Amino acid sequence: MNSLFAYSKSYQYVLSFIFLLPIVAISQYTDVINSNRPGVSVSAYAVGKNVVQAEMGLFYEQKDHTLLNTESNIWGTDISLRYGLLFEKLELNYEGTFQDQNLTYLNFDLVAKRRDFSRNRLGLKFLVYDPFKNPEANKPNLYSWRANNKFQLKNLLPAVSLYGGANFVLGDNPFYIGEPTISYRGMIATQSRLTPRFVLITNTAYDRITTDDPELSYTISLSHAFRNPKWSVFVEHQGIDSDRYSDLLIRGGIAHLLKENLQLDFNMGASLKNTPTRIFFGIGGSYRMDFHKDSLKAIEDQEADQNGGAIDKKAMKKKKKEDKEKGRGAEDIDLGPSKKQLKKLKKAEKKKKKESSEIDF
């Protein structure tokens, strides 16, 4: 196999160990859309039970190959349909990419046209470990804003999901000549919240299993939410290695949350080699239809004061004000309490301790 990595075999084993190291279970449903766009990396978390989500985009790519002396222009569309199946930590998803390519052989002044699915995949993703499953272990520090926002070693512990799926090649597909109708894909997806604003995602996949040219790939993605969490940016690196095609890619982009169920995005990227040279960009959006309902819990199983006691007359006004101050955060990113909120929480805690220490006669 022509490896794209210029490292020794022993170094490749070390890299493989590092990517598999996070392998050590309840999904985290969020009130806002949780989209995998605008990158190609896959989040460890599912969308949530009974949530239907569509992620779509249009892209253009210029691809030139110096050795083959070819040039090509590619227009295409990609779509991902995600559904929270049966319970919170399981997701069913379909991924498809349809593209139209004009390939020019410069040596012969010949133009060939290719049009079909370059990706046509169905799979299941299952969350096997969630470090945020226990809310008691992730309470904010009421005495230090810095402690809640700085990087901590425990933040490296990721959520971990396993993915299994199948690729489908239907008819005479010019992108996969001679390949079987069905091949298989397995993947490990991890997600770490390094700080309240930074999220690290890694994907390690073995694709097109049972074909003559199976493919090993990895993706490392780092996203950052701004203080106004409706805006976020990302940078992503992807490596692909197979006899059919090998490459190193870098991409970046920006996403904007228009509503709780609607996100728009833009991305662009390029390859780090010239066999082929690739430059691409795309725009897209994600839309969620939320039919999620929280599971009912018997009152005898609930903790004291879990329902918050008596309802304040101004509770809804307070909630609207808090939502306005928070700005409705980006997916899977909790910016934590502000300094002002920490002072209020600290004051409330002292008052609670004082009341509990009083003795009734």
Image (tube, grey):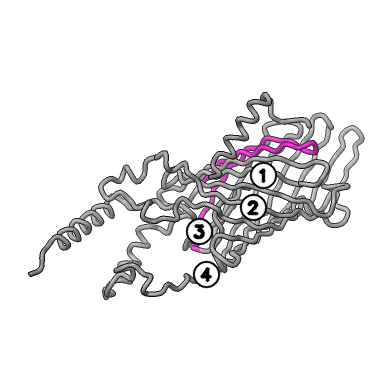
Label 1 close to label 2 by CB (< 8 Å): yes
Determine which residue is flagged by label 3. 26
Determine which residue is flagged by label 1. 205
Residue 45 counted in the magenta span: no
- Label 4: how many Cα within 10 Å (few below 14, some 14–19, many 20+): some
Looking at the rendering, the stretch of residues picked out in magenta corresponds to 233-260
Residue 254 counted in the magenta span: yes
Image coords of residue 26 (percent x, y): 50, 58
Q: Of tags 4 and 1, which is closer to the observer?
A: 1
Looking at the image, tell me whether mark 4 or mark 2 is earlier in sequence order. 2
Image coords of residue 89 (percent x, y): 55, 60
Label 4 close to label 2 by CB (< 8 Å): no
Amino acid carrying label 4: it is His
Residue at the spot x=61%, y=60% of the render?
91
Separation of disc 3 and disc 4 at Cα? 15 Å
* Residue 58 vs residue 51, the one in the foreground: 51
Quadrant position of the N terminus in the picture:
top right
Determine which residue is flagged by label 4. 292
The residue most toward the left is 361
Amino acid carrying label 3: it is Ile
Find residue 163 and name its label. 2
Image coords of residue 13 (percent x, y): 64, 30
Label 2 close to label 3 by CB (< 8 Å): no
* Residue 14 vs residue 235, the one in the foreground: 14
Decide if residue 250 is on the left or right side of residue 309. Answer: right
Q: Secondary structure at mark 4?
A: loop
Q: Of tags 3 and 4, which is closer to the observer?
A: 3
Q: Secondary structure at mark 1?
A: strand
Amino acid carrying label 1: it is Ala
